[in-house]
Image (cartoon, rainbow, N blue to C red):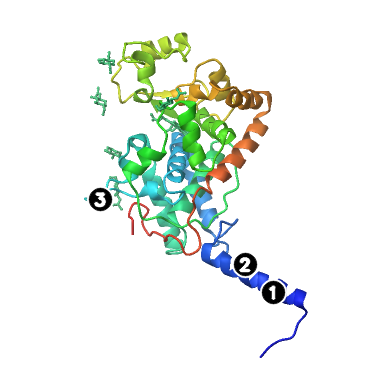
Amino acid sequence: MMIRMFPGLRAALSMVFVFGLVASASGQLQMNYYAKSCPRAEKLVQDYVREHVPRSPNLAAAILRMYFHDCFVRGCDGSVLINSTANNRAEKESIPNQTVRGFDFIDRVKSILEAECPGIVSCADVLALVTRECIVVTGGPSWRVPTGRRDGVISSATEATNNIPPPSSNLTTLQRAFTNKGLDLKDLVILSGSHTIGLSHCSSFSSRLYNFTGKGDQDPAMDPKYAAILKSKKCRNPNDNNTVVEMDPGSFKTFDLSYYSLLLKRRGIHQSDSALITSSSAKAYVTELLKGSQENFYAEFALAMEKMGRIEVKTGSAGVIRKHCALAN
Ligand code: HEM
Ligand SMILES: *[C@@H]1O[C@H](CO)[C@@H](O)[C@H](O)[C@H]1NC(C)=O
Ligand SMILES: *[C@@H]1O[C@H](CO)[C@@H](O)[C@H](O)[C@H]1NC(C)=O
Ligand SMILES: *[C@@H]1O[C@H](CO)[C@@H](O)[C@H](O)[C@H]1NC(C)=O
Ligand SMILES: *[C@@H]1O[C@H](CO)[C@@H](O)[C@H](O)[C@H]1NC(C)=O
Ligand SMILES: CC(=O)N[C@H]1CO[C@H](CO)[C@@H](O)[C@@H]1O
């Protein structure tokens, strides 16, 4: 039977109907997505991180990096967590991931959520939520984590190598990698500020110290005094793959602006860090951040992290909810 109504109302109702369909087919991230389906999900993540991460603060940096690597390969879909199999070299095997740690921690949080509400909370959301809590409990910024990501089932080492820029990258390469993911120059400068915490292996930058152009030379973009300290105190052997150094020496556990001060002193650890002062527009973001407060940095970081967390997400009927984060299905 036809219901008679005012044309305007009918139009409004059909709009609601159409939008409803679009939303359910493609879906979108929303705050507290699990409020009905798994009400304690975010609290359980928070409790577990609060209990364990303060005792191993290095884990927070490792997991922040893991989240970046997840989002840059097939979007934030938990693909970084998948183990290799006999016939697939997963992202974990790629050069950039050989130094990522903390996978077992994510797997443990996931198993807590599986016990609470089986098959509901994606590995991609577990990683997104754990990352935020890790940085918060170690005294860093917080940011909004809308949820509803679904998991991918494909994880390829080659794709990781192709999408995660290497530490030898110049600014052009970095900008291309970020633009490919919908992130701009400002996002690049702000997110690189993550290197205010954590460690790097000598092998990630030793060519800058020992053999920059293949002639036994140093990278002229690095302060020679700093290079000398690194060579005599830390990375004594050009082929050292094991020693780690603080990226922001003296304050590598504190989420502060000192990373950006180091850049201006030409003490960025990787070429990709030094690259951020090689164009006037990028450098302007660095100097602007240094003029502002730590609160301002945190606010900018929060916006950029939320944006990174939306890269190519699978929602609605796309993707799956994996039971074990290390397994594709
Ligand atoms: C702009 C391009 C980037 C490059 C080339 C890069 C490269 C690197 C490299 C080579 C390391 C040291 C790995 C090792 O030797 O152990 C590192 C560490 C780290 N990166 Fe980045 N990174 C970039 C951007 C980011 C972004 C966007 C984030 C987070 C949003 C991030 C977070 C971290 C963290 C927290 C660490 C310390 C990890 C630990 O202590 O285990 N990086 N990065
Ligand atoms: C940046 O690096 C890429 C890849 O190594 C290289 O092709 C390009 O010439 C470099 N650009 C500049 C401006 O040095
Ligand atoms: C420096 O690099 C060049 C070219 O790749 C190589 O032939 C040489 O053996 C390297 N020197 C050292 C000390 O590693
Ligand atoms: C470090 O790793 C590289 C590449 O995997 C390897 O060729 C080299 O022999 C290693 N160096 C040492 C001292 O083990
Ligand atoms: C994934 O690989 C890690 C490291 O090799 C291993 O400890 C873990 O048990 C594996 N997970 C699964 C579910 O096979
Ligand atoms: C965590 C992890 O799986 N790391 C792997 C990275 O790649 C190396 C070499 O392929 C493996 O030995 C590691 O187990």
Nearest to the eye among marks 3 and 2: give it.
2
Relative to 298, 259 lies left or right: left
Q: Residues within 10 Å of mark 3 (few under 14, many from 20)?
A: few
Q: Secondary structure at mark 1?
A: helix
Residue occupied by mark 1: 13
Q: How many marks?
A: 3
Residue occupied by mark 3: 85
Query: Which one is in front, 8 or 324?
Result: 8
Q: Residue at x 60, y 44 (%)?
A: 143
Q: Residue at x 51, y 20 (%)?
A: 250
Picture quarter with the N terminus: bottom right
Which amino acid is tagged 2?
Phe
Nearest to the eye among marks 3 and 1: give it.
1
User: Closer to the N terminus: mark 3 or mark 2?
Assistant: 2
For the view shown, which residue lies furthest in the bottom direction? 1
Give above or below for 255 relative to 263.
Answer: below
Residue occupied by mark 2: 19
User: Where residue 38 sits: x, y (%)?
Assistant: 52, 63
Residue 248 visible? The answer is: no
